[in-house]
Image (tube, rainbow, N blue to C red):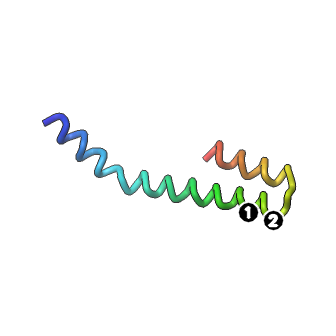
Amino acid sequence: MRDDAAALLAYQQLPAYKQALAHALELLAQCYDALRDSKSKEAVLRELRKLKKG
């Protein structure tokens, strides 16, 4: 019974996990764009700091 409750709770939290993953991937893409487009160390570090705070 306890396993069923844990499984239900995990299932209910899936949308939040999916949203967090999508947000992290979006930030990673922004970091990649900063690397590719500007080659600016400051821009890349700024994007990485956003990921850490995220």
- Above or below 40: residue 49: above
Instruction: In the rendered view, tell whether residue 10 sits above or below residue 40.
Output: above
**Secondary structure category for the residue under label 2:** helix
Circle on res. 49: none
The crowd level at tag 1 (other Cα within 10 Å; few <14, some 14-19, many 20+) is some
Residue at figure coordinates x 41%, y 53% from the top left: 16
Q: Is residue 5 left or right of residue 39?
A: left
Q: Mark 2 near mark 1, Cβ–Cβ under 8 Å?
A: yes
In the depicted structure, whether residue 1 falls above or below residue 32: above
Residue sitting farthest toward the left = 1
Q: How many marks?
A: 2
Furthest residue to the bottom? Answer: 37
Counting from the top left corner in percent of width and height, residue 15 is at 38, 57
Q: Amino acid at mark 2?
A: Asp
Which numbered tag is attached to residue 37? Answer: 2
Residue 33: give its label.
1
Say which element carries label 1.
helix
Q: Residue 31 occupies which quadrant of the picture?
A: bottom right
Relative side of 27 to 3, left or right:
right
